[in-house]
Image (cartoon, rainbow, N blue to C red):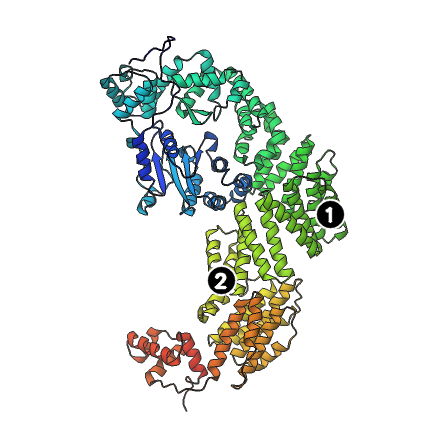
Amino acid sequence: MIRPVRPDGKIETGGAFVPIVRRRVIDRIASAAMQRVVLIVAPAGYGKSVAMRQYLDSLTEPHIRYDVLPENGGLLGFLRGFADALAEVAPDARGTLAGAYEKNAGSQSPGADLALWMHSHLRSYRGIVAIDDLHVAQSDREVARFLVSLIERTKGNVQWIIASRATSGLPIGTWLAYGESDLAIDEHDLRFSVEEAKEAARSFRLGVRDEELIELLQLTEGWATAMTFALRSSTRSVDLRNISSMTREMIYRYLAEQVYQTLSQEEQQFIETAALLPEIDLEVMVASGFDRANALIEDLRARVAFINEYEPKRYRLHDLFRDFARHQVELRGSGEQRDRLARLGSILEQKGNVAHALRLYVEFNAPDDALRLLKDHGIRLIDGGFADDLEALTSVSVDEKYEKSPVVSGLRGLLDLSRGRHTEGERKIARSIRLLDVPELRAELTLRLAVNLTVRRTSPVDLICGLLAEPHVSDSLCAEGEALLATWYARAGEPAKAEQLIASVDRRSALLQDDEWLARVALRVGNAFDALGVVDKARQRWTEAAELASRCGLWSVASRSFRNLANTALFAESNPAQSLVFAQQAASAATRAGDYADLQNALISMLSLETRRGNAERAEQIERQLGELASRDVRAQSTYIASSQAHRHAWNGRFSEAQRLFGSIIDRQAHASDQALIRSSYALVLALDGQLKESGSVASATRELLRKKHEPAQRFGALVFDFAQAMLALAEIVAGRHVAAERLLARRLRGGHDAGRAMHDAVEELARVAKGPNYVAQDLDEHLRVIRAAGFGGYARYIEHAAEHMRRLHQPETKISLTSQELSVLRGLASGLNQKQIAAQMGRSAFTVQTHIQNLIEKLGCHGRTEAVSVARAAGLLEEKM
């Protein structure tokens, strides 16, 4: 191998190392990109990263590249790096990461759940997402679940390019079968060809015979990294023959040693220091004592092939060479290694890279520095999405002082709380609070423990009073503590103490500038006013909290604020339209926060409201959304879904299906008003289904429920009772029990709402229609219009069904001629026999009976068997002739 010599006597190497553009590989990726998912799968060193970068550089459409680093190995680390890569198109994802991860850590499949959260932030993006080195995180199966679920959710919007050493966890067969992906680009596609090897040699100013070049290709099996190193360092094929039987990794180590031995001591130290960083930060390198860092980078890139410029002025060591360099550091002994890493940690700390500095301090036994960082930044690291790092680093045995430190104890307690280990977490935090000598950290731990106790309905009074007595505690911590305590006192029936604390919170809040703190405080003060029964002030504070939280991306607070506003609009103001708007905003915010308990609550509210409106199509959509969630409250979710489905069946005349569903949830309502409404609806569909005896039994029990002195605290509860009373009267009218209906209609209305009055009046009109054929319900349409305008069109549909039932009862009698066999079939259906049993009883085939049933349905002008029996009974066709 021959290189030219420059006029200054130096060997010409071709300048800074730049990988050759391999058009063949770019075209292969472009061909695979005709599908939605592109896979580049090959062992280390085959040029996957370079191929991906060159392909992306050839594009004009938007693209995002995520390089998975060693610190991104677990699910949380992977999400942290992914959110950082998406910062420009999904700016709120990073800020909500810690909360979303914490809320889903206990899920059976947190990866799939968190894909829904990430999709809410990525929803508006149209372009390519490229993930390099996925294998770094593939040992955590939840990473693959997250990625696969997110890929599924982004159909039509995002194309994916994934480079990895393995395919574990990826549904390759499914993607291929459904045309989502082409065959993976593998090591055979990525191997250097003879022509590419010649082009690389020319770019390195290297003269090499074709025979030797071909032999190098054979010895390295076209392995891109090994081939590049060999050409760049002028390694001859004869030098590789002796190790040709070894693994590719052994060939690489040999080449790395050849390169490493050519470096000066300063260059070796530069490389060994750079290997401890995720990327080569020139400012950090200068601060580490390498004044010529920029020149060293350029000189090394001119001579070797292991430093990549992946973005302008941003460099990384090839990961294989990085591992080699770190091994060299270990060979030099722990003392030198510790000194170098401690110095590097100090520099990273000064630059604000606290997480990496802490990793270095713990890894190389610097407990004092590690504890100092934990005191100052531990809680911020948890809130910043580094709980995985913190959990690992606080579990390491550095020394006894570190392990027994109240700082470590307190932080591990917070991690326990976030994983649902409340008893253990509370014990650790309580110990930390007793022993800590850092006022601000002690105050933050106190507040977080108080919040946890409050959620578990345990008094936080002693804790918060201790917090407020602390000297030198920030106004923001005190304000949130006072707001939390005000809510506790208000709910405990001590309004004077609550009002006094609210006044103090307002004085402190005037000094606060941080929107996040102000949003949290406003939410808690709103809760306190709500507990005091001051609805207007509660609404005002929740509105303020929702606006502040939405502005600064604090979506969990926004979700809870919107949910509270939705409840206020519905229950205190009887305004379902406004409540639906707030519930939709709560659902959107909860999705972006990754809080699926709040999302479930918001969707259930929306489902109930859309069902009351009679919006069947939208109700079905919401049911599908609920079905996608790993339900936090299965019983509540299934109850509301069953109720919605029962109403929709009834609207469509499928009364048997409706009464079955109503019957399954008759005792599962939390509030007496809802229970009364479900029972009234049940009685009505039974009556419409012709099951008059069963309807009477349910109606009797419901009347007893309505007689009880239920005095709902909110207007909406009273309105629901009014609807239940009207629906029950409607059931009695349909069943022909007119006296019972009149007694129900004579009762006073509780809600004082226009919709309740219109419902009552509509039923009263139908009661008059039921008394004879001469009365026409002239005002019925106007009553129905009022009901629908108020957001209760679902109940208007029941009135329409009952009106149609009355119309059929009073329409001019037409002679219905049934054959004796049709009458026999009809009586069999009425007695509960099925088609096969009727056939056996009559001695006819099941097909013949089916024909008779179809004729019956047509003659009676019905839609099904149940309605046919009901109409026949009303027409007296089932009465035995004397």
| Residue nearest the observer in this picture, 576 or 407 | 576
Residue 35 falls in image quadrant: top left
| Residue 381: percent from left, percent from top | 57, 33
Image quadrant assignment for residue 847: bottom left
Left or right: 292 as drawn, with respect to 446: left
Q: Are marks 1 and 2 in contact (CB under 8 Å)?
A: no
Please tell me whether residue 835 is drawn above or below residue 497 in the rendered image. below
- Tell me if residue 330 can be seen: no
Label 2 Cα crowd, 10 Å radius (few <14 / some 14-19 / many 20+): many
Residue in the foreground of this view, choosing between 393 and 267: 267
Please name the residue shown 57% across and 77% down the image: 779
Amino acid type at image mark 2:
Ala
| Picture disc at residue 403 | none
Question: Where in the figure is residue 834, as x and y percent of width and height?
Answer: 36, 73
Q: Nearer the viewer, residue 379 or 225?
A: 225
Spot occupied by residue 822 in the image (x, y as percentages of width and height): 34, 82
Whichever of labels 1 and 2 marks the residue nearer the N terminus, that label is 1
Q: Point out the image quarter for the C terminus.
A: bottom left
Structural distance between the alpha carbons of marks 1 and 2 = 42 Å
Label number found at residue 642: 2
User: What residue sits 37% from the left and 29% below the top?
Assistant: 50
Q: Which of the image's four quarters has the N terminus?
A: top left
Asked which secondary structure carries label 2, the reply is: helix
**Residue at label 1?**
502
- Please tell me whether mark 1 sits on a helix, a strand or a loop: helix
Residue 468 visible? The answer is yes
